[in-house]
Amino acid sequence: IALHSHPTVKRKDTTMNEMAQLAFWRAVERCLTAFYHFSLPDAREKALELRKQIEELGPKTSKMIYHDQPLNVASDIAGQHDANIPHEWIESYRQILRECHW
């Protein structure tokens, strides 16, 4: 199941502030550790590296990342951007989103 086409996994709010951005990147980090077995320091480093690259592109472009799912971003970081998200990950992913307030 491709997560971005899964109708039951949606972000509640499209307004983006600093707290929401932090929650997004925290969820990306958690996805990297939970699904792709990154260590927490490696997950933080990779997420921060991507965040900096995106922010250097300017505010209009950098805001586009927040329209994606954190798991899709984590999948891209892990080099699995073309992979379908296993159905059995969906509930764990929902839990990560709740815990990260995303």
Image (cartoon, helix red, strand yellow):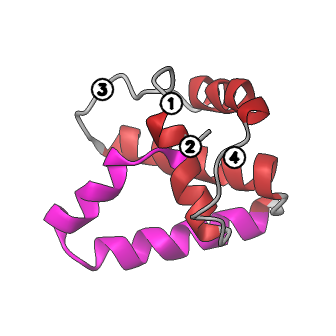
Front: mark 2 or 4: 2
Which residue, given by chain and number where applicable, does mark 4 sit on?
30
Residue in the picture at 52% in, 76% down: 49
Q: How far across and down, in percent of the image, does residue 17 sit?
A: 27, 41
- Left or right: where 65 falls relative to 25: left
Q: Earlier in the sequence, mark 2 or mark 4?
A: 2
**Cα distance between the residues tagged 2 and 1:** 6 Å
Q: Are marks 2 and 1 in contact (CB under 8 Å)?
A: yes
- Residue found farthest to the left: 60
Q: Which mark is residue 64?
A: none
Residue designated by label 3: 13
Residue identifier under label 2: 2
Which x, y percent locates residue 27? 58, 43
- Kindly identify which numbered label has been placed on residue 6: 1
Marks 3 and 1 sit apart, C-alpha to C-alpha, by 17 Å
User: Disc 2 versus disc 4: distance between alpha carbons?
Assistant: 19 Å
The kind of residue on which mark 4 rests is: Arg
Closer to the observer: label 3 or label 1?
1
